[in-house]
Amino acid sequence: MTKLFNVHDYRKAAKRRLPKPIFDYLDGGADDEWSLRNNTSAFDKYELWPHQLSGVGEINLATRFLGTEHQLPVMLSPTGMTRLFHHHKELGVARAASETGYAYSLSTVGTAKMEDIAEICKTPKIFQIYVHRDRGLTHEFVERAKASNYDALCLTVDAAVAGNRERDFKNGFSVPPRLTLASLASFAAHPHWTLNFLREHDFRFINVVHRVDAISSGTLGVMKYINSQLDPSISWDDAAEIVALWGGPFIIKGVQSAEDAAQAVEIGASALMLSNHGGRQLEGSPAPVDCVRPIRDRVGDKLELIVDGGVRRPGHLIKALCLGANAVSFGRPYLYALAAGGENAVKAFLTSFKEGLKRDMALLGCADVQVLDERFLRSA
């Protein structure tokens, strides 16, 4: 871990540790993967504008969003099936997040129980839901999240159907992974992952298995699961119903247009995760960072905005906040770290990211993330 300095290093380490079908599921996007690449490259359109002699002896990263105090304006995005990448799965990530001061969000299709995550996570925690065809399951999630004292609920709305993830088709990717003639060489070349897979091969979607045991009889492609189990007919009325049922801080994940943002205000949402699902759904959709200005102009301070997608460096976070976001979130960076070395590697990456944020704030000449604005930014 001492030789891994940034996301790119952790990605290379993850690629060495994971069989090809598993790495490609983590690393890939939809169609030609333009949106995936653009999520990060879009940050290059903005330059940081430093202010010198500003008195930055002590840097304050703390801020408030989603109704609670956060040690820094970052939350770890909800990512499904984290067990695929390391046997420490979501529990290891949640422990690392708690120890380093990051908010953590758990996915509906996670491989750790939401109650277990709630017990170990001492930082703000968010539970992410999809609307399944079984609407009773959605209501059950809300009640379980309340009982476990989650700080916020997050509804993902950009997965009416699965995106065209061609890497997964080519690899025959499924959950749990299948050892086929085509993939055997890759699994054999990664014995550490494969031995842990054989020792601990429970890949069930543990929070839904009592009602939707979609993989109990064998393997299932991820895209087939989305298309067979999630309800593509959900509407703003359904979202409003969940907002009312929850009664607390509520995030809608997957909104990118100002018109949808205005509708989110109308139904009582608290925040938006500006997201194109990591470039895994609609190819050609805009980078989340490019959505901040038009949405902020439309809704003012009626919604908190979280930039989800493309964040790889602390400077990306700073640019997002200067544009008007309240926070950022990321998924692949911590999953690369998890795959590279489990819980300790996640902790090392998150610690490094936080220290880098302090350094960049000092170099920018701004001592408090809460005062970042367009004074510190210009278009390149």
Image (cartoon, rainbow, N blue to C red):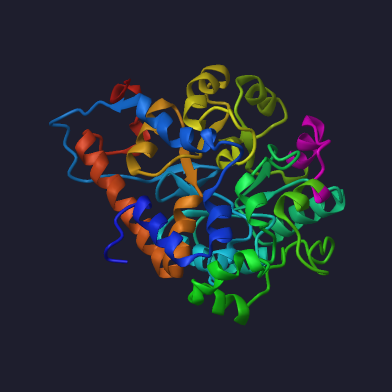
Q: Which residues are magenta?
A: 228-244
Q: Where does the image place residue 346, in percent across and percent down from the top left? A: 42, 62
Q: Is residue 307 left or right of residue 323?
A: right
Whether residue 9 can be seen here: yes
Q: Nearer the viewer, residue 346 or 175?
A: 175
Point out the residue furthest to the left here. Answer: 53
Point out the residue furthest to the bottom here. Answer: 199
Say which quadrant the N terminus sits in. bottom left
Q: Is residue 182 above or below residue 263?
A: below
The residue depicted at 63 percent of the width and 25 percent of the height is: 261
Whether residue 125 can be seen here: no
Point out the residue furthest to the front here. Answer: 181
Q: Is residue 195 left or right of residue 220?
A: left
Q: Where does the image place residue 31, in percent across and percent down from the top left? A: 61, 37
The residue depicted at 41 percent of the width and 55 percent of the height is: 11
The residue depicted at 73 percent of the width and 63 percent of the height is: 207
Q: Is residue 106 above or below residue 55?
A: below
Q: Is residue 76 left or right of residue 150?
A: left
Q: Where does the image place residue 232, in percent across and percent down from the top left? A: 81, 38
Q: Nearer the viewer, residue 376 or 147?
A: 376
Q: Quadrant of residue 24?
A: bottom right
Q: Quadrant of residue 199?
A: bottom right
| Numbered circles on residues, count | 0
Q: Is residue 238 magenta?
A: yes
- Magenta segment, prevailing SS (helix, strand or loop): helix
Q: Where does the image place residue 188, in percent across and percent down from the top left? A: 53, 74
The residue depicted at 68 percent of the width and 37 percent of the height is: 158
